[in-house]
Amino acid sequence: MNPEIEKLFRAKKLRRVRLAALPFHEKVRAVVQMQQMAAPVLRARGKQVRVWDLPPSDM
């Protein structure tokens, strides 16, 4: 396999391991961030979107 592609696959695997190790509340915050990023696109397509409401971070 191409060394550049192998490097990409290793980076992808490492990122997945790091994300899996996050505490639950950080995973939820990541989901909310993705919802916020996707909401304008979905609304522009006429979809009804509701982004979860989270309290401010204590950290």
Image (cartoon, rainbow, N blue to C red):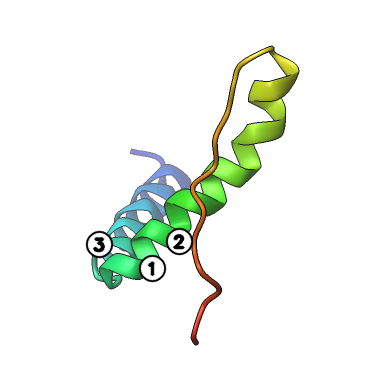
Whether residue 57 is situated above or below residue 20 in the rendered picture: below
Whether residue 23 is situated above or below residue 43 in the rendered picture: below
Residue 16 tag number: none
Residue 26 tag number: 1
> SS for tag 3?
helix
**Residue in view at x 75 percent, y 19 percent:** 44
Between tags 3 and 1, which lies in front? Answer: 1
Toward which corner of the image does residue 51 lie, by quadrant? top right
> SS for tag 2?
helix
Closest to the observer, 35 or 2: 35
Mark sitting earlier along the chain (3/1) = 3
Q: Is 38 displayed left or right of 9 in the figure?
A: right
Q: Neighbour class for label 2 at 10 Å: few (<14), some, many (≥20)?
A: some
Residue type at mark 1 is Glu
Residue type at mark 2 is Arg
Cα separation between marks 1 and 2 = 5 Å
Whether residue 36 is situated above or below residue 57 in the rendered picture: above
Closest to the observer, 19 or 29: 29
- Per the image, the residue denoted by label 3 is 20
Task: Mark 1 and mark 2 in contact? Answer it, CB < 8 Å.
Answer: yes
Q: Neighbour class for label 1 at 10 Å: few (<14), some, many (≥20)?
A: few
- Per the image, the residue denoted by label 2 is 29
- Residue 15 x, y percent position in the rendering: 37, 60
Mark sitting earlier along the chain (2/3) = 3
Cα separation between marks 2 and 3 = 14 Å
- Residue 24 x, y percent position in the rendering: 27, 66
**Residue in view at x 69 percent, y 26 percent:** 41
> SS for tag 1?
helix
**Residue in view at x 35 percent, y 60 percent:** 27
